[in-house]
Image (cartoon, rainbow, N blue to C red):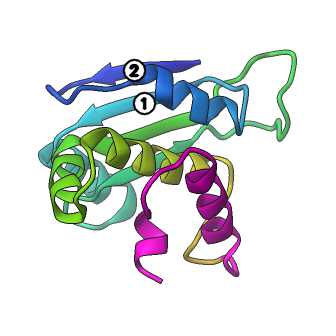
Amino acid sequence: MIELDNQTTLNVDIEALEKIAQSLTNREIELIITDNENIQELNREYRDRDNPTDVLSFPLETPFTEQSVFDIPLGTIVISADFVRERAKTYGHTEQDELKLLFIHGLLHLLGYDHETDEGEMRQKEREIIEEFGLPSSLIIRND
């Protein structure tokens, strides 16, 4: 269900990420783990922001809104391993927990949530998933 392209030395617990993904969708997801330099290039090219970021989501644009008989992938999540390591140290939890938090954040964006424009729906959904999987506070919850 998750097609992993790990371009770094960061350990990835793919089974844990699969469980999270399966709680929200049955569609395939591409997950790319990269470094700050590469994610900055993507951020500049696709968001006109010339700085590294923690996670980017690229939903696959299709005419289908529900899972169809065609098994169309949901999209791509790109996560910076540099951010994972830095934030894990800053917030005092494991790199795996930080990776899961960023994955959840990216996955919710693939599913159409947008904390920059919604009225707290993404924040609430993220909180529910974090509690379900026993994770520490995440991006948008930390910024409340």
Q: Is residue 111 above or below residue 74?
A: below
| Image coordinates for residue 72, horizontal then vertical, percent | 71, 23
Q: Quadrant of residue 68?
A: top right
| Image coordinates for residue 90, horizontal then vertical, percent | 17, 64
| Image coordinates for residue 102, horizontal then vertical, percent | 41, 50
Observer-nearest residue: 14 or 67? 14
Q: Residues within 10 Å of mark 1 (few under 14, many from 20)?
A: many
Please tell me whether residue 112 belongs to the stretch shown in magenta: no
Observer-nearest residue: 105 or 73? 105
The kind of residue tagged 2 is: Leu
Rendered image: mark on residue 31: 1
Q: Secondary structure at mark 2?
A: strand
Q: Is residue 110 above or below residue 1?
A: below
The residue that disc 2 covers is 4
The kind of residue tagged 1 is: Leu
* Pointers 2 and 1 in contact (C-beta within 8 Å): yes
Relative to 22, 46 lies left or right:
left
Which residue is at a point 22% across and 53% down the rendered structure image? 88
